[in-house]
Image: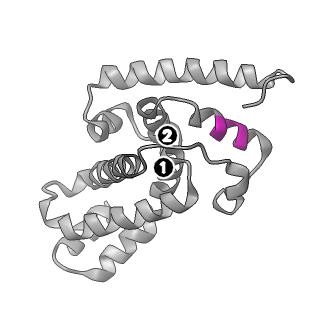
Amino acid sequence: METDMLVEAAKKGDKRAFDKIVQRYHNELYYTALGIVKSGWDALDICQETFLKAFSSLDTLKDVSKFRAWINRILINKCNDNFRKKKQFTVVDFIENEGFIEDSKEENIDLLKALSLLKDETRIILTLRYFQDLSIKEIASIADIPEGTVKSRLSNGLKELRKIMKVGEREDVKI
């Protein structure tokens, strides 16, 4: 409810309200972007671009209760723009980006590496569900796909992730 009031105030030009929105959503959006683009620096840039776009487009948001889905859609679009700019995407070694991961325990790094091996569409869905704890309905809205497709991608993505992680447990195979 408080977010709705902040968004309404920001729509009316209250910059302090928008600053509070940025503070509230920055970490959530950053970790989502990190899970998608796998680069701390790119994730920071994408977050900044997302907030700039959101600020300049706030007047287009008709239902303030859907702000979270709306800003996540902007973030996903910015991540896709990032992929298009780079065209050739390379996997970042998360150990080198330790400063961007608060808890760099070995199993968390293994999970992030395993996620990086998934298709983009699957990684995005898993990141939104398990890093942001969004509902199936919210993810469907953000990704602009049916709820059934979200469920299918979650199920298949988790199976694929389990397979990757199991392979990674063998001593002769490194993720």
* Residue 127 located left or right of residue 166: left
In the picture, which quadrant includes the C terminus?
top right
Where does residue 113 sit, x and y in percent of width and height? 65, 38
Mark 1 closeness class: few <14, some 14–19, many ≥20 residues within 10 Å = many
Q: Are marks 2 and 1 in contact (CB under 8 Å)?
A: yes
Q: Quadrant of residue 63?
A: bottom left
Task: Give the number of the disc on residue 32.
Answer: 1
What amino acid is found at the position of numbered circle 2 in the picture? Answer: Thr
Q: Nearer the viewer, residue 19 or 107?
A: 107
Q: Residue at x 35, y 37 (%)?
A: 139
Task: Give the number of the disc on residue 106.
Answer: none
Q: Residue at x 52, y 38 (%)?
A: 130
Q: Magenta-highlighted stretch: main secondary structure?
A: helix
Q: Is residue 170 above or below residue 132?
A: above
Mark 2 closeness class: few <14, some 14–19, many ≥20 residues within 10 Å = many
Where does residue 25 sit, x and y in percent of width and height? 43, 62
Q: Is 28 part of what is drawn in magenta? A: no
Helix, strand or loop status at disc 2: helix
What amino acid is found at the position of numbered circle 1 in the picture? Answer: Thr
Query: Is residue 103 shown to the viewer in this render?
Result: no
* Residue 46 located left or right of residue 109: left
Magenta region:
109-113
Q: How many marks?
A: 2
Q: Is residue 28 above or below residue 139?
A: below
Q: Residue at x 30, y 41 (%)?
A: 142
Query: Which residue carries the number 2 mark?
Result: 127
Where does residue 5 sit, x and y in percent of width and height? 26, 68
What is the residue that sits farthest to the front in this orientation? 88
Q: Residue at x 53, y 51 (%)?
A: 34
Query: Is residue 45 shown to the viewer in this render?
Result: yes
Helix, strand or loop status at disc 1: helix
